Amino acid sequence: MAFVVKWSDAVDEVITGDLTAAAAYLTPAGGAIVTGVAPCGLRDRDRGVVSFSTSLGLGRKLRHIIANPRVALAFHAREHGFSTSPRFVVMQGVASVDLTPDQERLDALIPQVERYLGEIKRGRVWDPLLRQYYRERVLIDITVRRVLTWPDLAAAGRLEVEGPPLGEDPEGQAPPRNGVGPRIDMDRMAKQVSVLPHRLLAYRGSDGLPVVVPVDVAGHDTAGLRLVTPPTLLPPGGRRAGFLTHGYRPHLVGLSTRMFTGWLEVSAASGAVYAPQTSKGFRAPPAKDLLLITNGMYAKYGLWKAQREGLLEELQELPRTDPASIA
């Protein structure tokens, strides 16, 4: 049985206070994808578990997590939440995906969700519109294996580790078959990144758990984004990595996000260079009611598509890794 990490009060204040977190998971090629989620303070400290919910319509993410449940949550932003801590916190662990949570558990989440995301809309108009958005959810529970804490949001201070110590830096990876250079327009990407305040990079650590770190951007050229980080924060060599940039308002209204996959190269001569190769993202409406209408319609479409494609049955039949078997 794996050791249960019971994190400190200081860490608990962060994870129960932040409105959003960055969730990282791994790809079959050994890369990482990082996306924004709203954990809403869901955790069981005695069991060493943190949780968040997602939509059944996001099939690719669920396939990746079920196939390789090693994940991480990075608590990196204090805006519009309840914590004033300066800490940057990463919780690494093993995910268990509940594809069909019972209604009692979903109902029990309502007070938590309302605290972070605002009042749940009810009534003759809202109930049919938002039924799939509120009810057809997938719950992801993460058994925490390690907690990484830096004293500041830039991760520039001394790292503290709760749980097993970090190993050596991961070795570099073999380059992609189609090359390591950018495959999207760098000027456009740089403009997208420049207007959003939060930037995070994720990669596969030496023990197979994702690592998520904050980065800044010093500029760009034909090779990619020139990243700025504290010394030794990124491992030397080349590897697949995910990049997230996003911004948001209270209750996640006006959320804007861009997610990239690509190649990270770190060397003493060139510093850290990120070459983006795929990109996707969205911009949510800046008004709460309009946001809910959009979310409701998107959830309806996502569920219809999932049902048409037999996604639930496919995900249920995927081979699963017992979280207890992962050290």
Image (cartoon, rainbow, N blue to C red):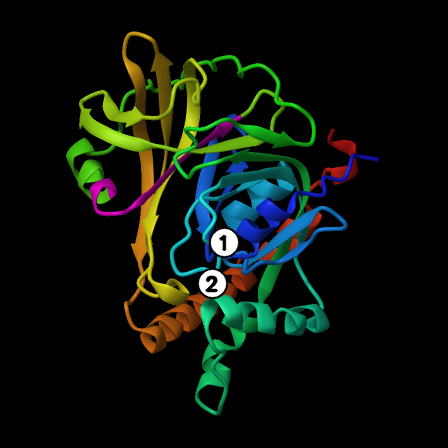
Query: In the rendered image of this protein, does residue 216 appear above or below residue 136?
Result: above
> Who's the residue at 78% across and 35% down the image?
3
Q: Residues within 10 Å of mark 2 (few under 14, many from 20)?
A: some
The percent coordinates of residue 223 (x first, y second) are 23, 20
CA–CA distance between discs 1 and 2? 8 Å
Query: For this rendering, which residue is in front, 272 or 230?
Result: 230
Image marks 1 and 2: residues in contact by CB distance under 8 Å: yes
- Which residue in the rendered view is the most extreme toward the bottom? 124
For mark 1, what is the residue?
58
Residue shown at 29% from the left, 46% from the top: 197
- Is 76 inside the magenta-drawn segment? no
Does 178 appear above or below 155?
A: above
Q: Please provide percent x and percent y for residue 82.
A: 48, 60
Which of the 4 image quarters holds residue 94? top right
Name the residue nearer the viewer: 61 or 75: 75
Q: Classify 59 as above or below 133.
A: above
Whether residue 42 is visible here, answered yes or no, is: yes
- For residue 302, which numbered disc appears in the image? 2
Q: What is the quadrant of the N terminus in the image?
A: top right
